[in-house]
Image (cartoon, helix red, strand yellow):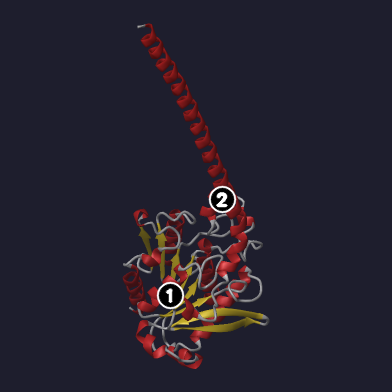
Amino acid sequence: MKRRIDKSESKATAAGKEQRTGRHKSKDLNVQSRSQWCAWTKMGFLTLCSLFVTIPFLLPYFSDSVDLSRPSDVGLNYTINIYLKPEEGVRVGVWYTVPRHKWEESKGQDLEWFEKALGDGSPIFIYLHGNAGNRASPPHRIGIAHVLSGAGYHVLAMDYRGFGDSTSEPTERGLTTDTLHLYNWVKARSGNSLVCVWGHSLGSGVATNTAVKLQEQGKHFDGIILEGAFTTGKGGYQHPFTWFYWKFPYIQYFLFNPLKDNILELPSNENLKKIRTPLLILHAEDDPIVPFDMAKELYSIAKNAQKSDKRVKLISFESSLGYVHNKLYKDPRLPDIIREFVQSLMA
């Protein structure tokens, strides 16, 4: 009996030791797991920091990776690249895309053919893009060219001076001068065709500046479309990378931005008090960069100035669609919206 008790005690002692050893092993595993988690967290944090530092310096290389003299490289096979000279020492790059009904005919054609095509009677859109990048990037700029061309219109998308492969430095006067030059170049070749302007974001201010200058010269656009338009660049316009700044507040000092050293006023709110051209304003309600309230303010100003709710239209796109600042081109209703506006110009 005594020997059995001793064996039982021995087994109990061994079991206790084993249990304590197991607890120690469990603690060791927990410590090891926490250590690994900390290591991965540190690695992730360092990776994010590295991206934070390097992305701004890499952006110019991605932006310039497209050969802008070859629009076919980005799927615009019915487009020709042109260089114009608005002033001495200034060269601006322009992509000219023909309407859908001329896609096949345009293959292999030279500049002379494209210039003659401008006078075929189809409406023409001068597209003025937003800040940063070029006529190829961000991709929504190509998207708009596809939409307008597919709807049956000529499209001329310009890089202002200092943008893309255009030379010189961008200024408010310079951007307006470039657009005036393109307008006159188009009008000299377009006969009686309608010539409209589409300004997105920064381009909306350039469009209204140019419209005022044209009126002073006794000329005018036949129609104006403003997308993601701001009231004025002086204290009212937020940079197109605002969403990124929310996450990384000091990144703007490093990003490639041709206008970073220039303050542009671009007072669309004041310009629209003078403009008498039919106007269509397109704006996403969830735009985080240019608040929708700005679109409503511009609409009110223009409607009062022209004393008409037929010549001035505002079309909003619901927040649920997620178009934010630059994705309106994805809306399947957009071609019909544009056609209806163009048809109203012919009435």
Badge count: 2
**Secondary structure of residue under mark 1:** helix
Does 307 appear above or below 247? below
Q: Position of residue 150 (x, y in %)?
A: 36, 78
Dot 1: within a 10 Å radius of its alpha carbon, few (fewer than 14), some, or many (20 or more) residues? Answer: many
- The reply, left or right, for residue 274 in relation to residue 50 is left
Residue 310 percent across, percent down from the top left: 35, 68
Amino acid on which disc 2 is placed: Leu
Which residue matches tag 2?
48
Question: Which residue appears farthest toward the top when viewing the image?
Answer: 2
Front position in the image: 42 or 119: 42
Pick the residue in front: 272 or 188.
Answer: 188
Tell me the SS state at disc 2. helix
Judge depth for marks 1 and 2 and give the one in front: 2
Q: Which residue, given by chain and number where applicable, does mark 1 sit on?
A: 145
Q: Quadrant of the N terminus?
A: top left
**Residue neighbourhood size for the residue with mark 2, other residues' Cα within 10 Å, grouped as few (<14), some (14–19), many (≥20):** few
Towards the viewer: 328 or 165:
165
Tell me which corner region of the image, top left, top right, bottom left or bottom right, holds residue 335. bottom left
* Quadrant where the image shows the C terminus: bottom left
Where residue 46 appears, as percent x and y from the top left, is 59, 48
Q: Earlier in the sequence, mark 1 or mark 2?
A: 2
Q: Residue at x 60, y 50 (%)?
A: 49
* 1 and 2 marks in contact (CB < 8 Å): no
The residue under the point 47% across, 29% down is 26
